[in-house]
Image (cartoon, rainbow, N blue to C red):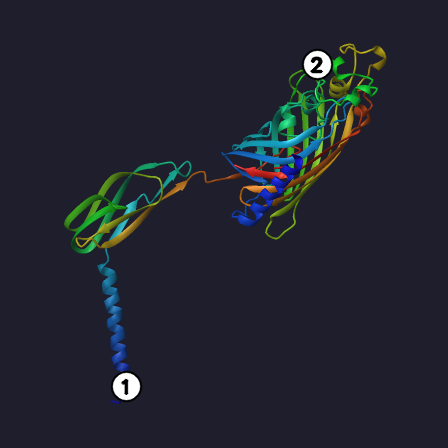
Amino acid sequence: MTFKHQLWTRLVCIAILCFTSLNSQASDKVTLSIKPIACIVASIGQPCKLNVTAHWQAPQPMDLCIYQQDKLVHCWTNKQQGQKRFAISIVQSTDFKLLNSKKETVATVSVAINAAKPVSYRRRLRADWSVF
Amino acid sequence: LRTLFYLCLLLVCHYSIAQQPPTNEGNDPQYTQVGQWGFSVALGVGQKSNPLKGGEDIPLYFIPSVHYYGEQFYFDDGVLGYSFFENEQFTLSALVKLNAHAANFYRWHPANIFIPNTQSLGAASPSDEGKDEDEYEKPTTVELEQLAKRKWALDGGLQLNYFTDNNLMFQAQWTHDVSGVYQGDSLSIKVEKNISLRDDDRLRLKLSAGVDWHSAKLIDYYYGISERDDVDGSMFYKGKSSSNWFASTTLSYVMTERWRAVLTWQTSKLDAGISASPLVKDASINTSFIGVAYDF
């Protein structure tokens, strides 16, 4: 086997190992879902109050806590999945994060806030004479 | 004092142009945000001529502007309206407003404060204050003091606006005296063109022209002379329906987000139904104003 063939064989092996490793990391990922994912208010600036359900799943049992921005909502100990229903009041789009025991963020979901009536404009029907 | 005022005005303009570049060039002044009050004032010098015999021209130094637009309801400088149909091209509204002709007989009529309207003939103060001595020597056929009080009237009607695009508008308006003062009608047709003279849209020119038709009842109530007035019978005058042509141009320069320099001029030609009245000395009204406007 020539040196050139050996080099190619090694490169292919490395590529296969990398791919396998990436796949393994993907399956290790903690998944978090929040429902509902959006809140509708009459106009921007109004508070939105609603009950949401957070659900997460991990490849192996973990110690995890869910935060609304920086505020602790609930913790689970040595669980592979968890679910929690709680009330929130938000005035703007808000992030919900799952943190492990090392305070590392392992998953993030954002609840968006949208206005039913966004800022709208009208043509002015001005008076006959106006400097404005 | 006037020279000082001009100098101050020039300084304000210069300072605003030199120190504060515009930060909101994309704003279209033809639109306003729904649900938000708008206040503006214009400071400068100007004048509205008064065609009435014995009447004084109205100086214009300070012109306020107030508007509010809801989804359908709106208030714009003395006009209260309700748009019950609106799309990209058409707006059909019902409206009420004070008749501007009463402003000819009252200096502080809202039409002389908010809107020096093309229909307005200026204010003829019933008092003698401010008259030149020479004025008393001029032969006037009818003294305004001899006239019976011309009441304020509230007009209500319909208005249709047609926008071919953002820069050209046609407007037709019909109003009737809903206050029962003169019991007449008015029709108005106007075309308005807005032209941007610079790529950044800072310098804008607004041109408008049209015609106001007023029924004989309206003209007779405000400009007719009859038994109600303390005038010799030989001076009686019966008002006739009139069609008054008008044209105006306004040049504005956006200096900053809130400051604008404005220059405006308009003229209105009075039809014979008005100009033939013994109360009227001029067959046209000219209005001019130069200054700066500030949006709060």
Residue A120 at least partly seen: yes
Farthest residue toward the right?
B234
Q: Which residue type does callout 2 highlight?
A: Lys
Q: Is residue A6 above or below residue B65?
A: below
Near mark 1 (Cα within 10 A), the count class, few <14, some 14-19 or many ≥20, is: few
- Per the rendering, the mark at residue A122 is none
Q: Which residue type does callout 1 highlight?
A: His
- Per the rendering, the mark at residue A5 is 1
Near mark 2 (Cα within 10 A), the count class, few <14, some 14-19 or many ≥20, is: some
Residue drawn at x 23%, y 50% as measured from the top left: A98
Of the pair A103 and A49, the residue shown nearer to us = A103
Q: Position of residue B206 (x, y in %)?
A: 67, 42
Q: Is residue B278 above or below residue B254?
A: above
Q: Is residue B292 above or below residue B118?
A: below
- The CA distance from mark 2 to mark 1 is 112 Å
Circle 2 is placed at which residue position? B149
Q: Is residue B187 above or below residue A40?
A: above
